[in-house]
Image (tube, rainbow, N blue to C red):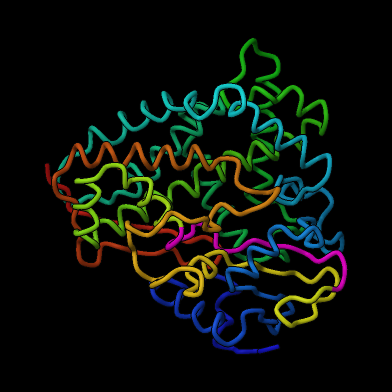
Amino acid sequence: MHGESRWAGIRSGSFGASGDLYALYDAMRREAPVWGAPWGDVYVSHFDLVAACLTDPRMSHLPPASGVASDSALRNWLIYQEGSTHAAIRAAFQKPFASGGPAALKPYVDQAVELHCTTVSDGDLDIVPAFARAVPESVIARLLGVPAADIPRLRAWSMAARELLDGGFGTAFDETTNAVDEMSAYFTAHAARLLKGRELPMLLAGLPDLVGKVGLDVAGANLALLAFAGHETTVHLISHLFYHLAWAPDQLATVRDEPKLVTNAIAETLRLETPIQKICRWPTETIELGGQRLAKDTLVVLLPGAANRDPRRFAEADRFDLRRPVGQNLAFGRGPHVCIGRALAEMEARAVLAAALERWSAIEPVEGGAKWLDNASFRGLDRLVLRLAA
């Protein structure tokens, strides 16, 4: 396997410049689509290989027991579960969608958009804190019954968790108390209070069954996951959507003229700027992948952001194109662990964009106004200043 040192930045954040990440992916797909890193992990960048790994039953979601603290709250997250525990957590969180459908969530989204988008003044504005983050935070807090006064704590924990997860399993799963542990403790206590009340928040209709099957601590840890994943990736989706439309005025004009293309705009944004850049799997036996033999328990890091720009799957893969057929990209995963909150994330992005198009006749970039996160696991904008005019 290749041991290219120029790709070592993929291990942790080093992508402050927007182009670095995709140049690295291009080289990996071309030269070593299954790359064995010097530190022992294996990275997969081709679309077909990433898609196959997401549905291969031999690729486990469970980290090997060695090196993982047994009391780590992160270890209890849904994304690291299989079997009956995975089924119980997933069923509990899908219950609101099954009973009321995405339409039941729309009032929460509309209220958050009304609060954070329609009151924004014209001029140069950093849209990340103004509404790209504020709307998803407000929505997930209400859906989970989190008091508005606690949203700053949720934000701080989420940002810390984002950095923790980018640091690798050696630190994320050790015995040191971290942001995920603190967040999980908060939501465990929150769940206990909710179970004593008369009415449960929208997303937690399945909480009593979940606690009965997996216990309060595991349920609390997964409420923390729901709070984190339920808004963090949507923040980046909304920011990326406005970034690409602002930098492509012809595409922005097309969306204004043909509102039905909003769905295409969201799909193309997710493909081009996939919020979650790394998905981890561990082979349960020795397997062959892309001509390489991988030993049991090797950490295999799937790169959906690289897969979604694979030119063999997407013509002119680096171009933002609203006319591109809406195919199945891998931004929300695939298989039994596909993202539960996809419908909510897309609903929020549609609502925010619709409000912006109605509110502003001009949405333009500001030179030097975009700053990308220095993070190899999450693709997002730390700052996005746009010029807005009614």
Tell me: residue 197, above or below residue 34. above
Residue 130 falls within the magenta-colored stretch: no
- x, y percent for residue 102: 50, 30
The image quarter containing residue 55 is bottom right
- x, y percent for residue 279: 64, 61
Q: Residue at x 49, y 80 (%)?
A: 26
- x, y percent for residue 23: 45, 80
The image quarter containing residue 341 is top right
Name the image quarter holding the C terminus.
top left
Q: Identify the magenta region.
A: 271-286
User: So how many labels did they put on this image?
Assistant: 0
Tell me: residue 261, above or below residue 136. below
- x, y percent for residue 57: 80, 58
The image quarter containing residue 352 is top left
347 horizontally vs 243: left or right:
right
Q: Name the residue nearer the viewer: 280 or 266.
A: 266
Q: Name the residue nearer the viewer: 328 or 201.
A: 328
275 horizontally vs 61: left or right:
left
338 horizontally vs 237: left or right:
right
Tell me: residue 18, above or below residue 75. below
Residue furthest to the top in view is 198
Q: Residue at x 79, y 71 (%)?
A: 298
